[in-house]
Amino acid sequence: MPPRTTRAIVQTGPRRLELRELPVPDIDDDSGLLRIEACGICGSDAEQYAGILPAQWPLIPGHEPLGVIERIGDRAAKLWGVDVGDRVAVEVLIPCGHCRACLAGHYQVCRGRGGMFGYSYVPLSRPPALWGAYADYMYLDPCSLVHRMRKDIPASLAVLFNPVGAGFRWAVELPHTGPGDTVLVLGPGQRGLASVVAARAAGADTIIVTGLTRDAQKLTLARELGADHVIDVEAEDARRRVKELTAGRGADVVVEVTANSPVPVAEALHYVAIGGRIVLAGVKGFKPVPDFVSDLVVVKEVHIIGAFGVTARAYEAAIRLIESGRVPLAKMHTHDFALEDAERAIQMLAGEIPGEQSIHSCLVPDRTRS
């Protein structure tokens, strides 16, 4: 018999999470129900938890769902190319398919359903409520975008599809990275490390990663995943070091994925080569950028590209790479957490627990109650 209820973590306000039991909805011909195997946790989860990201509470967080199709309508099965029992990775955004952005091929910035509409960002008040993956089960909207994934990949590795997909979009797809390029990644978090992996897969010639002194473990991992050089910006003159490593040219591509601090955005202008590309993907809580010298954009003819979300093409590239086993991506994953430990998982990723740090982690619901 299908489940009647599901456990779910509900956020009721900034830094307020509750474990609740919610009803599982009926599924029509166009929708589905996903049994969550794992849900990845990223920096935006911490920003949502802290109240930095605008939200309509209460809601169920969790926008990196990996799971198995529990139930599915006939039309949805035909449209998505999946059936009951298939494992799928689910995209964050749920596009309308009809707005100007969708029709122009930019569905990742669709606003046709009233603001940003996607898993983890839809309030509990909108039926059927199960719009997030911090739960045992999640509703699959008719406009969901899902990707099949092999079942033999461990869940904690398979769920890396989202950050690795971001790496392919931000470090490769948007800046058109290719053989011969020098890529500089600002920030060695999970998206920064994924950018290293993606840039290497795209044939970048040289990859450099910057971080802080406290990021020593992550910088070491960046080297293991393909970075040629790492820079501790608190111990070295980063501008001088980038110049040395690039023979004075600067980086062809700069990928800015640091969290909260706007300072690296201004610094990127000093690192980038003439005619180079800067991709801005790290959110800063809508803080202004100090010391941004716009003349450097002009005299260097720099292309500055904003990156929001991931595309299907990038997700597919990530899934293929994960399934290939060519890269030791499991080294990025440091922690599994039970559903009821969601708050601890978020706080650890945000560096709020003294002496403990995670790089990539996920929630793994307890199957013993299913």
Image (cartoon, rainbow, N blue to C red):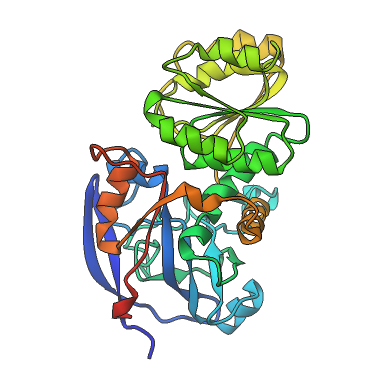
Residue at figure coordinates x 54%, y 82% from the top left: 84
Of residues 337 and 134, the one nearer the viewer is 337
Q: Is residue 362 left or right of residue 151?
A: left
| Residue 111 visible to the viewer | no
The one nearer the camera, 293 or 352, is 352
Q: Is residue 137 above or below residue 17?
A: below
* Quadrant of the snapshot with the N terminus: bottom left
Q: Residue at x 38, y 86 (%)?
A: 2
Can you give x and y, in whole percent of width and height, for residue 150 in the image? 60, 70
Q: Residue 300: where, in percent of width, then height?
A: 70, 12
Up/down of 131 relative to 3, above or below: above
Q: Quadrant of the C terminus?
A: bottom left
Q: Residue at x 57, y 59 (%)?
A: 96
Quarter occupied by residue 54: top left
Quadrant of the rendered image containing residue 308: top right
The residue at the far right in this view is 179
At which x and y percent is residue 326? 65, 53
**142 or 351: nearer the eye?**
351
Residue 124 visible in the picture: yes
Question: What x and y, as percent, mark residue 93?
Answer: 52, 55
